Amino acid sequence: MKYCISCLQPNTRPNSSFTNDGVCPACNYFSKLKNVDWQERFDILLDLIDKYSIKGSNKHNCIIGVSGGKDSTRQALWIRDKLKLNPLLVCISYPPEQITERGVDNLSNLIELGFDVRTIAPAPETWRKLMSLSFSKFTNWCKSTELALFSAVPRLAIQYEIPLIFWGENPGLQLGDLKTLGKTGYDGNNLRFMNTLSGGGIEWIKDEGFEERILLPYLYPDIDEFENANLQIVYLGWFLGDWSLVNNGLYSSLNGLELRSDVPENSGDLYGLTSLDEDWVTLNQMIKYYKFGFGRATDYVNEEIRAKRINRKQGIEIIEKYDGCCGEDYIKSFCEYIEISENYFWDKVHNNMNKKLFTIDKNGKIKKKFKVGFGLKY
């Protein structure tokens, strides 16, 4: 386990690769932003809009996938008010047991801001069963739900014949998931190769006896479907030099976004900005930490280090305190929903933790073997 020499990104992030000098992909990308001609990028964006957007002021000429959170709120406002487009917002609706009141309020806020929002609600019992299967099979309850979250937007784009799709950040450049890199920095059509979508599609679900006819919401369109519909996913974050967790949160908060009020000791969410529409992602962030040695707090800290608002030493202290935090109430409500015991939950977590990075003491507590910023040997 090694850390980026600039931030605190470990090389355990899936599909990531450091430079020979020990710099992570995200820091490497960020270092080059000072040389970017932003007017040139804006002109490229205008050309893309001219090529792919539906013409006509009374028509939806592009699609944005939204949750009602910081990124989708900023995207929707910027695309409408700066680019003068009329976007159709598309949201996957969680079951009542999962969605937070905060999430409902934030989606309502987008509607009150004047946007048309199309919500898609997959069958709730199928959703619950697939979430349970995902956790038992991968110790990752998001495995199935993310299939639906990512698939809904291009499926609706095909149905409505709206070829231009706006997405947020480029996960290859801005996070380090290099398999998602497209032909250009804004090209998102290789999003299908991200870690979530590339893991066998829905075959693992069909192998468990689920019929394909009920799995359409979880089926990402194939390459031929993209080409036949002339679909183009565009990473909006590539065109915005100030795209970040904090900036998007500030921008959206000034436009009615409601933030998480829970303390970071329960969520690892330093500023209450992420996954506002539900709370169980906090579990997955904890489990990710036990698998790869980094979690939600690391993502916050790395952005803060790149922005020079904190230094590496301060970042280490924050990560040591908050990475992997998850409140007991979140775990309890999740276990009740998928009908498992909390003992079973922890058995799965213990069995799937990275034993090179963590160990379990005699009291059943998980202890890390590494030191943040230094790795296993320090």
Image (cartoon, helix red, strand yellow):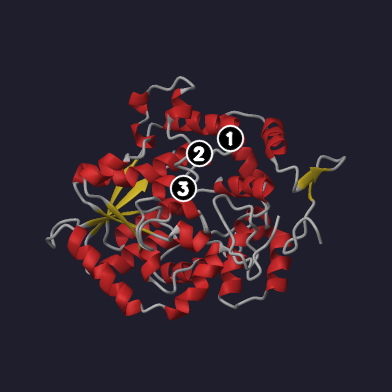
- Where does the image place residue 78, in percent across and percent down from the top left? 32, 69
- Mark 2 belongs to which amino acid? Lys
Q: Quadrant of residue 141?
A: top right
How busy is the neighbourhood of tag 3: few (under 14 within 10 Å), some, or many (20 plus)? some
Mark 1 or mark 2, which has the lower sequence index?
Answer: 1
- Where does the image place residue 156, in percent across and percent down from the top left? 27, 44
Mark 3 or mark 1, which has the lower sequence index?
Answer: 1
Q: Residue at x 53, y 69 (%)?
A: 28
Report which residue position mark 1 lands on. Answer: 138
Q: Is residue 125 above or below residue 286?
A: above
- Say which of 185 and 135 sits in front: 185
- Say which of 189 and 134 sits in front: 189
Q: Are marks 3 and 2 in contact (CB under 8 Å)?
A: no
Closest to the camera, between mark 3 and mark 2, is 3
- Where does the image place residue 96, in percent across and percent down from the top left? 45, 39
Report which residue position mark 2 lands on. Answer: 143
- Mark 1 belongs to which amino acid? Phe
Element type at mark 3: loop
Q: Are marks 1 and 2 in contact (CB under 8 Å)?
A: yes
The circle drawn on residue 194 is: 3
- Mark 3 belongs to which amino acid? Met
Element type at mark 2: helix
CA distance separating discs 1 and 2: 8 Å
- Where does the image place residue 98, in percent across and percent down from the top left? 49, 41
Q: Residue at x 73, y 61 (%)?
A: 372
CA distance separating discs 3 and 2: 12 Å
Q: Residue at x 52, y 74 (%)?
A: 31
Q: In this rendering, would 202 be left or right of 55?
A: right
